[in-house]
């Protein structure tokens, strides 16, 4: 691009970044497909006289047209003619802001060109079907009731009740009739698909998750679908700080990030000039943890070999090209797989294989792990969630049978959690409670067993501390190099000083509150209360750790994560919520087998479509705007359930977009080789996951499958 100033960060606390243009600017693209559509997300403040700013778009000096610009971010679509030029000219009204000497034009967030395609015949068929939403929704409600095992006339009664509820809601929400019918259609479609899949598993014993091996296959299939359709490696915002560790260590062999901040092509948060260079060391400031960068190093190194030796060689060996990002952030995607498998092992303590697998998948798709594993992998949250799950699993194993080896494993897992995300230390409270309990038990044990138990406990605690410290050592060494001290708070003490917890907003606000954005976390939190009655000690330890971590985050001024998707810091509590959800599903199963399946389907459908909505900018990411959004617009707005835009979301993923790159000039051998390499590594990870659970030990008959369903 030309005629643009450097990327800036919004001062409203939302974390939004943008670029100001000059009155005349230019966007440069690869050879554009023909015909095509130019998509621009931008805004422009009004002129001094209050008149709206205008934008004229031109190609090769020939003006295509002009239009008025809004004062808030919007996406504008400009059709480009056949044989479109590679350079798009932008001429905006000239603006002069008080205190800013620059000559300004418009504010640009992003721009891209997409091929314009004629609607396929099947698409026209879907448009025809989209009109009678109410009959389709009622038919799906009837089907879902029938799949749940309801006998006539109950399915018809369910449809009648759905119609009555819809009519009642429409009477209270004038103008929302079409949105309500669409919500009914999408919700009942999710229910019908989930219940139909459950029915199929009941009738085909080879599919029914009656054993750990079969349940893990379901988990691997769920992760593989999410990976193929949703994996989109990209570095942005906080992710640039994590990625800078990887790139600097691998290619520069140091921890000075000056060149990374100067050269990286990713949108990143500008540093405060007073923080750019640490006076004590001369190194550049980096407030993020080193853990994710270390775990991405193997993929980064493999990418470097691929770029140097791979077919076609179209990418520069600079550490920023697509192979580097894709193979490095594959580590975050695999972190999602580790999280799924660890949540399953945790949930098996309180649920059957089917219900444990269902709880794990519900947390993955019905909260934020999917998004941070596949769409925002440059953040630490997928890896921190996986590490927290490993810690919780190690703690449960220690509680079941204490030993020095299990204490060492617990310490290593806890240290890894802290290395990846420092505030995870708050969730390590169960380890301290276990030590206190075992100490009390040891002191009460009669001699001569008392000294033996106390020595074993002392040895285990020492091993846990040593292993935990060993895992955290890379961060201490990095801080010492960057800040001149091994212990520091990089963001400043004010960053970690909480205020009064805002539990109401944290749990229920549309501004990324737990219930609206991550309903599986909310349901899992409620389910944790069920453990108290069944296993009081475990329930107490888990509830205390959950409450401490949640309260700390609810007390932060930016508890919403600066507008990131769905309380990003709560991935640390994902294994807690999976355990609670497994307990809740077990209780619901006693009432009817369809209840846990239906609840999981609805939570997964809502949150996954919310991720599509968020990723495609169908909802304003700005914290202030989102806070002022009417509830009706959030839950029943035009784009509240963007099922019809899911294909756009998939096309933005790694596999679809990379295989489409050759049309812009990249050799097929290079794009295909990169896709094959990523797919091969993912397949190897899945094979390892399946093998870790061993072969299936028993086959369940159809009758026993029905008895043990979920």
Image (spheres, rainbow, N blue to C red):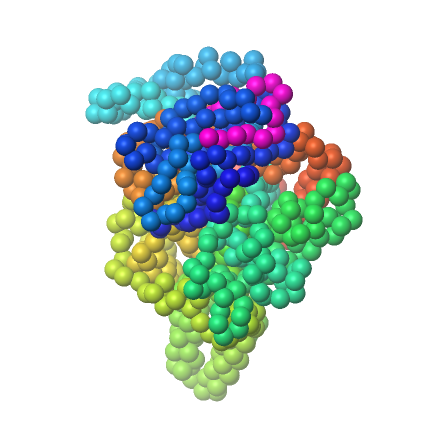
Looking at the picture, tell me which residue is in the foreground, 645 or 52. Answer: 52
For residue 208, above or below residue 417: above
Q: Is residue 668 visible?
A: yes
For residue 94, above or below residue 356: above
Q: Magenta region, mostly helix, strand or loop?
A: strand
Number of dots carrying numbers: 0
For residue 701, above or below residue 127: below
Horizontal side, residue 306 vs residue 372: left or right: right
Image quarter in which the N terminus is found: top right
Residue at position x 31%, y 56% in the image: 557
Looking at the picture, tell me which residue is in the foreground, 567 or 531. Answer: 567
Residue at position x 51%, y 22% in the image: 63
User: Where residue 303 sits: x, y (%)?
Assistant: 69, 50
Looking at the picture, tell me which residue is in the foreground, 387 or 16. Answer: 16
Magenta segment boundaries in residue numbering? 73-91
Magenta span contains residue 417:
no
**Rendering quarter of residue 291:** bottom right
User: Where residue 9 sits: x, y (%)?
Assistant: 42, 49
User: Where residue 265 sits: x, y (%)?
Assistant: 57, 47
Task: Find the residue positioned furthest to the left.
Answer: 172
């Amino acid at each position: 691009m030309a005629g643009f100033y450097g990327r800036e960060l919004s001062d409203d606390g939302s974390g939004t970044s943008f670029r100001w243009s000059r009155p005349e600017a230019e966007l440069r693209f690869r050879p554009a497909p023909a015909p095509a559509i130019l998509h621009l997300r931008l805004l422009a403040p009004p002129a001094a006289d209050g008149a709206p700013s205008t934008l004229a778009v031109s190609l090769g000096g020939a003006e295509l047209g002009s239009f008025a610009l809004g004062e808030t971010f919007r996406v504008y679509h400009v059709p480009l003619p056949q044989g479109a030029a590679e350079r798009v000219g932008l001429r905006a009204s000239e603006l002069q802001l008080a205190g800013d000497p620059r000559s300004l034009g418009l504010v640009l967030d992003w721009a891209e060109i997409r091929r314009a395609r004629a609607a396929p015949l099947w698409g026209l068929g879907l448009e025809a079907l989209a009109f009678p939403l109410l009959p389709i929704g009622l038919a799906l409600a009837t089907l879902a009731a029938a799949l749940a095992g309801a006998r006539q006339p109950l399915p018809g009664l369910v449809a009648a009740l759905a119609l009555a509820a819809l009519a009642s809601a429409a009477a209270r929400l004038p103008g929302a009739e079409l949105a309500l019918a669409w919500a009914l259609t999408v919700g009942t479609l999710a229910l019908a698909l989930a219940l139909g899949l459950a029915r199929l598993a009941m009738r085909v014993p080879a599919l029914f998750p009656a054993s750990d091996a079969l349940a893990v296959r379901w988990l691997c299939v769920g992760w593989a679908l999410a990976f193929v359709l949703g994996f989109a490696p990209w570095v942005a915002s906080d992710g640039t700080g994590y990625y800078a560790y990887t790139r600097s260590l691998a290619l520069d062999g140091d921890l000075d990030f000056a060149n990374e901040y100067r050269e990286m092509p990713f949108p990143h948060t500008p540093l405060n000039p007073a923080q750019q260079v640490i006076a004590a060391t001369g190194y550049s400031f980096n407030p993020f943890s080193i853990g994710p960068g270390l775990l991405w190093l193997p993929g980064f190194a493999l990418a470097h070999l691929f770029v140097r030796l791979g077919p076609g060689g179209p990418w520069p060996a600079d550490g920023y090209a697509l192979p580097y990002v894709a193979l490095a952030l594959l580590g975050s995607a695999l972190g999602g797989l580790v999280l799924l498998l660890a949540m399953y092992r945790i949930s098996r303590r309180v649920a059957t294989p089917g219900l444990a697998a269902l709880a794990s998948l519900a947390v993955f798709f019905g909260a934020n792990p999917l998004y941070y594993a596949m769409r925002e992998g440059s953040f630490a949250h997928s890896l921190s969630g996986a590490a927290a799950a490993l810690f919780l699993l190690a703690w449960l194993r220690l509680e079941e049978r204490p030993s020095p080896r299990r204490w060492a494993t617990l310490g290593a897992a806890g240290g890894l959690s802290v290395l990846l995300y420092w505030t995870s230390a708050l969730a390590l409270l169960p380890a301290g409670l276990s030590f206190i309990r075992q100490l009390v038990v040891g002191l009460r044990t009669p001699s001569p067993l008392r000294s033996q138990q106390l020595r074993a406990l002392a040895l285990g605690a020492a091993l846990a501390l040593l292993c935990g410290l060993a895992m955290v050592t890379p961060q201490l060494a990095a801080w010492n190099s960057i800040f001149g001290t091994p212990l520091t708070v990089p963001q400043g003490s004010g960053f970690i000083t909480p205020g009064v917890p805002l539990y109401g907003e944290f749990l229920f606000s549309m501004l990324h509150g737990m219930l609206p954005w991550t309903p599986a976390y909310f349901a899992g939190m409620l389910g944790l209360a069920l453990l108290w009655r069944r296993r009081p000690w475990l329930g107490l330890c888990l509830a205390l750790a959950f409450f401490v971590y949640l309260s700390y985050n609810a007390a932060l001024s930016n508890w919403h994560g600066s507008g990131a998707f769905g309380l990003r810091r709560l991935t640390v509590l994902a294994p807690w919520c999976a355990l609670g959800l497994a307990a809740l599903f077990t209780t619901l199963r006693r009432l009817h087998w369809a209840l846990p399946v239906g609840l999981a389907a609805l939570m997964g459908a809502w949150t996954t479509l919310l991720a599509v909505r968020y990723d495609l900018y169908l909802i304003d990411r700005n914290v202030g705007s989102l806070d002022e959004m009417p509830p009706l617009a959030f839950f029943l707005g035009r784009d509240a359930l963007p099922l019809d835009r899911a294909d756009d979301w998939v096309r933005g993923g790694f596999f679809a977009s990379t295989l489409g790159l050759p049309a812009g000039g990249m050799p097929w051998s290079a794009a295909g080789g990169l896709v094959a390499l990523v797919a091969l590594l993912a397949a190897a990870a899945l094979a390892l996951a399946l093998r870790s659970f061993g072969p299936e030990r028993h086959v369940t008959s159809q009758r026993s499958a029905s008895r043990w369903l979920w």
